[in-house]
Amino acid sequence: MKKNLIFLGIETSCDETAASVVMQDSKGKAKILSNVVSSQIKIHKKFGGVVPDLASKAHADKIDIIIKQAIYKSKKSFKDIDGVAATAGPGLLVCLMVGMTAGKTIARFLDKPFFGINHLEGHALSAGITNDISYPYLLLLISGGHTQFLSVNKFGNYERIGTTIDDALGEAFDKVAKMLGANIPNGKIIEKMSLKGNPKKYLLPKPILHKSGCNLSFAGLKTAVMLQIKNVKNNKCKYDMAASFQETINEILRIKCSKAMDMFLDLQPKLKNKNFVVAGGVASNKSIRNNLIKLSRSKGFAIIFPPSKLCTDNAAMIAWAGIKHYQKKSKGNFNVESSARWPLDPKAPFMKGPGLKL
Ligand SMILES: Nc1ncnc2c1ncn2[C@@H]1O[C@H](COP(=O)(O)OP(=O)(O)OP(=O)(O)O)[C@@H](O)[C@H]1O
Ligand SMILES: [Mg+2]
């Protein structure tokens, strides 16, 4: 067997064009040789959200140079690559197609296997790039489009035990940032504003806090911020609202993560190591990290976060997922198609919309 495995990863599911070269050594340790991420935030800023056609065009305009930079920075060349992985879904179809086409073309040309990766699997495995984590583990995925608790039973086996029934947590952060007049609506700004605010100033609701297991809901909380925004007249009030919102999220996560841990332990009665992984863009929030570190200690769980640059979208996690598939003796698949929707747990029921029973 070859000593080191080297994969090129490509990510274009939404508004980040990313490419990365990741190496796994003979002991199974990962090394990120390059990790290039180009954000399109400036392009979409004036529209208040991601415009699919513009996003797709921006990916197509840049993908070649981003891949070239990733190879150059890795100090490897294309002939060193053992396989290519690109995000196949979920995401915006017109965006996914750009990365998939680039990835398949490179893999064909190199005569190497190609892997179409589930973006959520990339997030789910991202903490494993920098940490040794044994299966099973409890995962809280908090990103811009998803908010779920999953029991990661083993590689490729993801059992959803809770989900948001409306907005994703990252989406709620983005919308509140927009309401507070942030130039670039991103959760990072709420975190920054909160540092100067009083978290007890505004009382905000915590929907379904004590019902529906570890399912979550953020739409009512977001609407409550919108209804109170008329009282937010100066910067001090803005900081207080940001801090109150973030504190409310922390309170919700404390209760729901505690519930998810209990449910996970019920599912895994013979568990030796109680591991809790928190991944996705919102997992880079330091206040949320500190809150969940405290909770995990009190519940006897070891908590693992990917480094911040691997929480938000990146192609290193896609390359890493590709390596994991390759090692499972998968030969890859050039026929894999892009999918806008691709749940990690295909058996989990759809939990959104009217008529939902909680
Ligand atoms: N420090 C932070 N605090 C709160 N939220 C944050 C922070 N940093 C990033 N986010 C949020 O993370 C989200 C982006 O994360 P990510 O890139 O994982 O999401 P996505 O790829 O758009 O969605 P998905 O992975 O579900 O398809 C955004 O909603 C952003 O507001
Ligand atoms: Mg993501």
Image: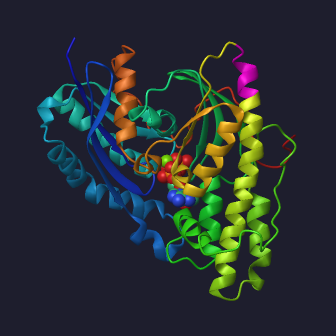
Task: Tell me where residue 116 sits by quadrant.
Answer: top left
**Magenta-drawn stretch contains 265:** yes
Quadrant of image for the C terminus: top right
Colouring used for the render: rainbow
Q: Which residues are magenta?
A: 263-269
Relative vertical location of residue 76 with respect to residue 94 in this rendering, above or below:
above
**Residue drawn at x 36%, y 32% as measured from the top left:** 320
Task: Tell me where residue 197 sits by quadrant.
Answer: bottom right
Across the whole image, how many numbered discs are drawn on residues? 0
**Magenta-drawn stretch contains 347:** no
Relative vertical location of residue 161 with respect to residue 352 in this rendering, above or below:
above
Side of 248 relative to 59 (left or right): right
Quadrant of image for the N terminus: top left
**Residue drawn at x 62%, y 25% as measured from the top left:** 274
Q: Nearer the viewer, residue 69 or 243?
A: 243
Q: Where is residue 309 drawn, in percent x and y?
A: 40, 51
Q: Where is residue 27 drawn, in percent x and y?
A: 30, 19
Side of 266 relative to 147 (left or right): right
Q: Nearer the viewer, residue 218 or 336?
A: 218
Task: Tell me where residue 179 sits by quadrant.
Answer: bottom right
Q: Where is residue 333 drawn, in percent x and y?
A: 36, 24
**Residue drawn at x 18%, y 47% as measured from the top left:** 73
